[in-house]
Amino acid sequence: MVVRNDKKSVAIIIEEWKFLILKLDEANRMENIVKRTAEESKGTARESIKLGKKLNKTVDRLLSTEEGISALILCMDDKTPKIQFMAARTLYPLYPQRTMKIMEGYEKIVTDGLEKMRIESVIRGFKDKQKVFVDQFKKMYNCEDLDSLNREK
């Protein structure tokens, strides 16, 4: 009898996470959105939703172990700025000061107008502790007191 091991290594999960981020980024760039026909846009929207759900599941898997969190921390120093930003965005409750610097740095180098607006919205939402972001983090980290997660104290 063959026993199937469903546990993937953190390295493989991180590679999946990076792939999904870059695939979503490509699909959602303004320059690519403008080029699409209405029918192509519908297909891309469906694909983006599907990729987003996979990305969320991947993040949940990474945040479920200290090894996964450590791998995300390393991604804040990745050579790809979008990967740095997404790692920072995910780890904000754990390292608010460090991650905010990364996110603000990414905002300065982004040239795509739509992406810039998304980043500004995230940064403002985090700084203002907007309910939508707070609730998202509470769910991601399964924790009501997000301040208790801060590792920079």
Image (cartoon, grey):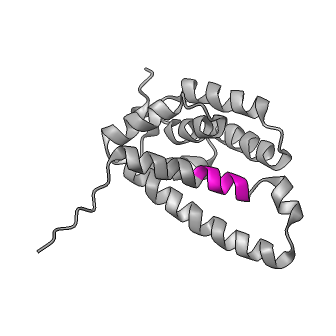
- Residue drawn at x 88%, y 61% is 34
| Position above or below: 125 against 127 | below
| Residue 23 included in the magenta stretch of the image | yes
Rendered location of residue 96, percent (x, y) = 54, 29
Query: Does residue 58 lie above or below 68 as drawn?
Result: below
Q: 66 or 141: which is nearer to us?
A: 66
Q: Residue furthest top?
A: 153
Question: Looking at the image, which residue is at 65% across and 56% down?
Answer: 24
The secondary structure that most of the magenta stretch takes on is helix
Write the residue at 63% across / 55% down.
Answer: 23
**Extreme-left residue of the structure:** 1
Front residue of 150 and 18: 18
Give the quarter of the image for residue 67.
Answer: top left
The x, y position of residue 70, in whole percent, is: 38, 34
- Say whether residue 150 is left or right of residue 98: left
For the C terminus, the quadrant is top left
The magenta stretch is 21-27
Give the residue furthest to the bottom.
39
| Residue 89 in sight in this render | yes
Q: Is residue 70 magenta?
A: no
Residue 65 image offset from top left, x and y in percent: 31, 44
Along the line of sight, the residue nearer the viewer: 141 or 118: 118
Residue 51 falls in image quadrant: bottom right
Residue at image coords 66%, 73%: 46
Q: Please state the horizontal and vertical placement of residue 128, each as a whole percent of the image.
A: 66, 38
